[in-house]
Amino acid sequence: MAADKVYSLADVKQHTTDKSCWLVVHGKVYDVTDFLEEHPGGYDIIITSTGKDATQDFEEIGHSNSAKQLLEKYYIGKYEGGDSAPSKTEQKAAAATQQKQTSGASRTFQVLLPVILLIIALVLNFYFGKK
């Protein structure tokens, strides 16, 4: 099996029209020119994502698994910049860290709020209790 061709950003930037349209998604280069007219969101959406790594644009839309499989039909090679998306392990670690930070802040708030309210009540009682 021959090695996959590797394309640079300069290569990809040469294919940003409806006559020749290449996308970079997850470190792979796709020639989606023949798909432009079939794209459910219209070809303009794809054209705006050409000439750069479109991984984030692709993932933000929330494409289905069948759309991801269909994309493989247009695969022409690898992108020299690699995959810009974080790995699943990195995503899980970031989510766990965020959850720990959120739960810690939440517990602090749950403890401090009643204490602050109690202090306010005591100060008001002291202030208005003298009269």
Image (cartoon, helix red, strand yellow):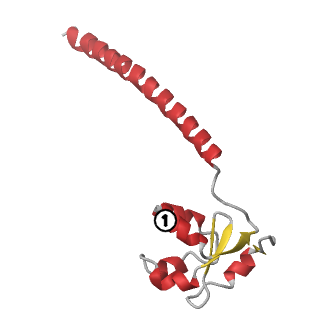
Total residue callouts = 1
Q: Residue furthest top?
A: 130
Asked if residue 21 lies left or right of residue 62, the reply is right
Residue 77, image quadrant = bottom right
Look at 58% across and 87% down and name the residue there: 17
Q: For the residue labelled by badge 1, is the local secondary structure a helix, a strand or a loop?
A: helix
Instruction: Quadrant for the C terminus, please.
Output: top left
| Of 108 and 81, the residue lying toward us | 81
Look at 56% across and 63% down and name the residue there: 56
Instruction: Quadrant for the N terminus, please.
Output: bottom right
Q: Residue furthest front?
A: 1
Is 49 drawn above or below residue 103 in the view shown? below
Q: Residue furthest right?
A: 2
Look at 39% across and 23% down and name the residue there: 110
Type of the residue with mark 1: Ser
Q: x, y (%) of residue 42?
A: 44, 80
Q: x, y (%) of residue 63?
A: 47, 64
Q: Residue furthest left?
A: 131
Q: x, y (%) of residue 52?
A: 64, 73
Q: x, y (%) of residue 93?
A: 61, 39
Q: Which residue is mark 1?
A: 66
Look at 28% across and 16% down and name the residue there: 121
Residue 69, image quadrant = bottom right
| Of 125 and 117, the residue lying toward us | 117
Q: Residues within 10 Å of mark 1 (few under 14, many from 20)?
A: few
